[in-house]
Amino acid sequence: MNEKRKSLLKGLRAALTALQKAGCENVYLNGSFVTSKENPADFDGCWDLDSVSLELLDPVLMNFTKKQAAQKKKYGGELFPNLPESSGQAFLDLFQTDKSTGDPKGIIAMNLRTFE
């Protein structure tokens, strides 16, 4: 594993821990980070709002200004609540669709109830 992936993994772990502390149970990862691409730029994902106490959530995870600059700076990637985005499609559905072809594609689901 190269240094870029190690850095992204460290940031992802911190973001997942923050979500877990707020009560989040499920996160879904997408993008080049979950492929064999040697140097992904960042990680992308979404998380279920069920069971999340927003008052316990790191406010950075709800900051979507300037293309999620605060999230990228703190964690190295972007995680969105699984809500409809500008097209009206929920992020989880959007992430499971290939942008180029419209075909279904796989993503990574993580259960934070067992995350350590």
Image (spheres, rainbow, N blue to C red):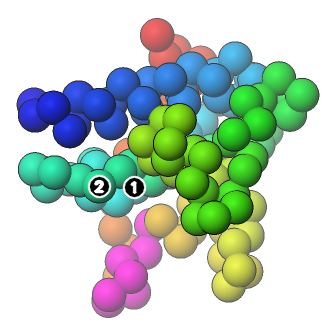
Magenta residues, as a range?
Answer: 96-102
* Image x and y of residue 40, in percent: 23, 53
The residue labelled by disc 2 is 41
Report the front residue among 6 and 106: 6
At mark 2, the secondary structure is loop
* Residue 80, magenta (yes or no): no
Specify the principal SS of the magenta part: loop
Quarter of image, res 23:
top right
**Which residue is the extreme one toward the right?**
55
The residue labelled by disc 1 is 30
For the residues labelled 2 and 1, the Cα–Cα distance comes to: 12 Å
Q: Is residue 86 above or below residue 68?
A: below
Q: Is residue 95 left or right of residue 83?
A: left
Q: Earlier in the sequence, mark 2 or mark 1?
A: 1
Quarter of image, res 55:
top right
At mark 1, the secondary structure is strand
The residue type indicated by label 2 comes to Ala
Q: Is residue 4 left or right of residue 28?
A: left
